[in-house]
């Protein structure tokens, strides 16, 4: 049966915690991820069929931007947790709160080329919320994450959409793109050769591909090609009508 990654494996009622670190952390009354919880999480992350991970926690894994004069303000074993997640050699998205600000931070290790730890903090609830869009290939591989922030205007309580942030989650050229996406790339390359320039406007891409009403499918395919670093989209933080798409050579 599948259990939550944050739930430690069941133990007999009379079981005694053997890990001294867990005992010490408990006595200090400070945030940390216990050994059993981390083991349960890593057992799921390392499964062969797990292509990427989405982990939700309260505390941040990276130090806060604003220093706090408070004992044990940070998660004590966050560095160890980060290193374990990176060892999975898979993209891991870690969603958290706690710090009352909303940074987006990425940790990587060149010794694990396919691993990437993306830490995304939600703002305080009165300040707004984030919408996350995950781009996943037909092979179940996560190629990118789009963060759409919605923030509250303190003056009148209205919510407005902020600049988008696109995060690639794959190593260069590694995307397991589907046939339709490769066909799109071929047509765009033919189109640019005919016109003698590699930079296209959004309406030109629509015309070249006869996308018509399938705008969302076209946008998704372009974002996957961007994540694979095969094309380059200028203006990702804006509406797609303002995108400038540079088509790379083969």
Image (tube, rainbow, N blue to C red):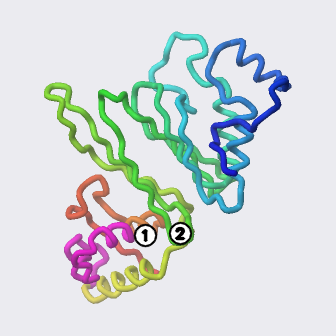
Name of the residue lying farthest toward the left: 156
Q: Residue at x 29, y 85 (%)?
A: 191
Q: Nearer the viewer, residue 43 or 89?
A: 43
Q: Quadrant of residue 74?
A: top right
Q: Mark 2 vs mark 1: which is more N-terminal?
A: 2
Q: State how far apart marks 2 and 1 are (Cα).
A: 8 Å
List x then y, in percent, for residue 13.
80, 26
Q: Residues within 10 Å of mark 2 (few under 14, many from 20)?
A: many
Residue 67 relative to residue 164: left or right: right
Name the residue beneath numbered marker 1: 225
- From the image, tell me which residue sits under label 2: 175
Q: At 40% across and 70% down in the image, what residue appears? A: 231
The answer to if 199 sits in the magenta stretch is yes
Judge whether 150 appears above or below 21 on screen: below
In the figure, 237 relative to 99: above or below?
below
Seen as rendered, the residue at the extreme front is 13
Question: Which residue range is magenta in the image?
Answer: 196-222
Viewer-nearest residue: 117 or 161 = 161
In the rendered image of this protein, does residue 81 appear above or below residue 188? above
Instruction: Please rate how many residues cluster around mark 1, counting C-alpha atoms within 10 Å: few if below 14, some from 14 to 19, many from 20.
Output: many
Q: Secondary structure at mark 2?
A: loop
């Amino acid at each position: 049966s599948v259990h939550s990654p944050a739930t430690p494996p069941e133990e007999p009622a009379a079981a005694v915690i053997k890990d001294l670190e867990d005992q010490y952390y408990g006595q200090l009354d400070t945030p940390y991820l216990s050994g059993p919880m981390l083991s349960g999480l890593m057992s799921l992350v390392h499964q062969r069929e797990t292509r990427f991970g989405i982990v939700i926690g309260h505390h941040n894994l990276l130090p806060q931007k604003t220093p706090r004069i408070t004992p044990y303000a940070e998660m004590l074993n966050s560095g160890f947790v980060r290193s374990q997640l990176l060892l999975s050699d898979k993209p891991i998205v870690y969603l958290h709160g706690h710090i009352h600000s909303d940074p987006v931070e990425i940790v990587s290790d060149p010794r694990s080329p396919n691993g990437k730890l993306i830490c995304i903090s939600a703002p305080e609830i009165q300040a707004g919320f984030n919408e996350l869009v995950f781009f996943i290939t037909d092979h179940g591989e996560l190629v990118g994450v789009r963060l759409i922030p919605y923030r509250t205007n303190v003056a009148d309580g209205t919510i407005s959409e902020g600049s988008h942030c696109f995060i690639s989650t794959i190593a260069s050229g590694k995307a397991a793109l589907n046939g339709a996406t490769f066909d799109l790339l071929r047509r765009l390359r033919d189109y640019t050769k005919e016109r003698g320039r590699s930079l296209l406007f959004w309406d030109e891409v629509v015309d070249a591909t006869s996308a018509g009403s399938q705008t969302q499918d076209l946008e998704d395919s372009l974002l996957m090609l961007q994540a694979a670093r095969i094309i380059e989209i200028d203006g990702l933080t804006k509406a797609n009508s303002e995108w400038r798409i540079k088509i790379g050579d083969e």
